[in-house]
Image: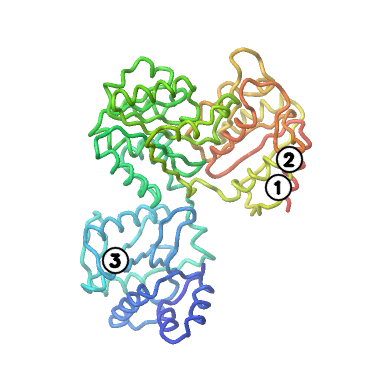
Amino acid sequence: MKSVNIISLVQAYDSLSPSEYDTYCQHYGVEISNNEVNDLRQLVIKMYEVLSYVNIFNDFYVGYKIQHISKEFDLLRFGDNSILNVELKNSSTEEKVKKQLLRNKYYLSHINKVVHNFTFVVQTNTLYKLGVNDELEVVDFGLLTQLLTNQNLMKIDSPDVLFNPSDYLVSPFNSTDKFINNQYFLTGQQEDIKNQIFKILSKNVHASISITGGPGTGKTLLTYDIVKWIKEQKRTLVVHCGNLNEGHNRLNQLGWNIIPIKNLKYHNLTNFDLVLIDETQRIYENQFDKLVIDAKATNTICIFSFDKQQTLSSSESRMDIEAKINTIVGISNFKLSNKIRTNKEIASFIKLLFNNQRNDVTLANSGNVDFDYFTDLTTVKNYIQLIGNDGWEVLNLTPSLHSTEHHESYSDSLNKCSHAVIGQEFDNVAVVIDKYFSYDSSGSLIYQSRTYYDSVKMLFQNITRTRKRLKLIIIENKQVLNRCLSVLNK
């Protein structure tokens, strides 16, 4: 996307043929409707009446969208000393204007502490500004033009370089205080699903709801956000299909009611209006069947949250939780598809790593994926400790309780394992790929040593916990090493 002079944009719309104008917009990466151009014309006229200095109309990004997030800004202008945002509304209410500008401030404050957020409502000829105390103020166009004049313009190739989408996915477990204090916003898709679910919950009748989404779609944030707002109205129980993590314990200290699935048998559903089953793909079949029967008998609402890809054992895969859930009569299904916590580079690398015959994925190597190769286990153990002290979350495969497995020979028992990090996220993740990982005849990654849990699925679980950087520690595995070299050196 390129910045554009907004006078130029309006005049191009007025004077070019439709095909010429479309080509013009494509050149700048501008997406703006005809009605919005007419609103923009009115803004330009009001600004020009105050100051006919053409430079203040320059270097605007029109209709910019943050990657992976359905968050769009009408007009953005970036300076080293401040960011300026103007939203265009043909008509609106002050309540809607304030809500949007508060949201804009949240997203833009990650880039610069000084953010000026305006909305121009055309029909009432009113310019609003979000004040320092987050109150809506009616201001004149002289303030807008003065702020534009005083901006020290920032030269960037694209706003994409300023926004890190993963900064906006707050984890209830890893950013619990931000979650509790409402320091986050849901995406448009999350908001839409939440509103539909609230309509179902408002009917006060027995209902079954499923929410599914792959890694990075914000499934955990959405489900816990729903519980946060509904638990004041309905007696709510959260059942986590695994052991509780530190975030769960912190929420329980703040008055939540979260239990591990193994403790569900001690709770009578007559005491609850709603039960959220988190990470349902890990539930045992007998637990699931009993829960469905009990919920129906007690008119308890059930929300099943799951990702069928994130199973960690062959028995979990064989159960096919999605098919089981879909057999529930009257189930309402919702699917999150827009990825937020997705570093494009890492997402592409994962696809190429897990199948060495894939050549249909383009990897933009920006240095967020790295690897080290070792042959000595003592060196590996020392190296794991070293990077663990340097900001890396080194994630182990989960060991068996019944026998010793090869991966335990190099794992640091103080580090988290696959089962302990379900639903969590970390900026920098490191994983170990030992000599027993290889590729089968179809190119799929496999593991050739006996483990109680599925090692490939655990590796996938661990790798998809990262938000920003990924490091592979490769031990005596030339096949995986060569795959990494061929992928990252293209």
Do the numbered discs 1 and 3 sit on residues whose CB atoms are within 8 Å?
Answer: no
Q: Amino acid at mark 1?
A: Arg
Q: Provide the secondary structure element on which disc 2 rests.
A: loop
Q: Is residue 97 above or below residue 317?
A: below
For mark 3, what is the residue? 119
Q: Provide the secondary structure element on which disc 3 rests.
A: strand
Find residue 414 and report its horizontal and vertical position in percent.
Answer: 55, 22
Separation of marks 1 and 2 at Cα, in angstroms: 8 Å
Q: Mark 3 packing: few (<14 Cα in 10 Å), some, or many (20+)? A: many
Q: Between tags 1 and 3, which lies in front?
A: 1
Is 415 left, or right, of 289 in this rendering?
right
Is 196 left, or right, of 128 in this rendering?
right
Q: Which mark is residue 406?
A: none
Separation of marks 2 and 3 at Cα, in angstroms: 53 Å
Residue at 68% x, 42% y is 353
The extreme bottom residue here reads: 15
Q: Amino acid at mark 2?
A: Gly
Is 357 left, or right, of 417 in this rendering?
right
Q: Which mark is residue 358?
A: 1
Q: Between tags 2 and 3, which lies in front?
A: 2
Q: Mark 2 packing: few (<14 Cα in 10 Å), some, or many (20+)? A: some
> In the rendered structure, which disc, 1 or 3, sits on the residue that comes first in sequence?
3
Is 167 left, or right, of 86 in this rendering?
right
Do the numbered discs 2 and 3 sit on residues whose CB atoms are within 8 Å?
Answer: no
Q: Nearer the viewer, residue 207 or 422?
A: 207
Separation of marks 1 and 3 at Cα, in angstroms: 47 Å
Examine the image and state in which quarter residue 454 appears: top right
Q: Which mark is residue 443?
A: 2
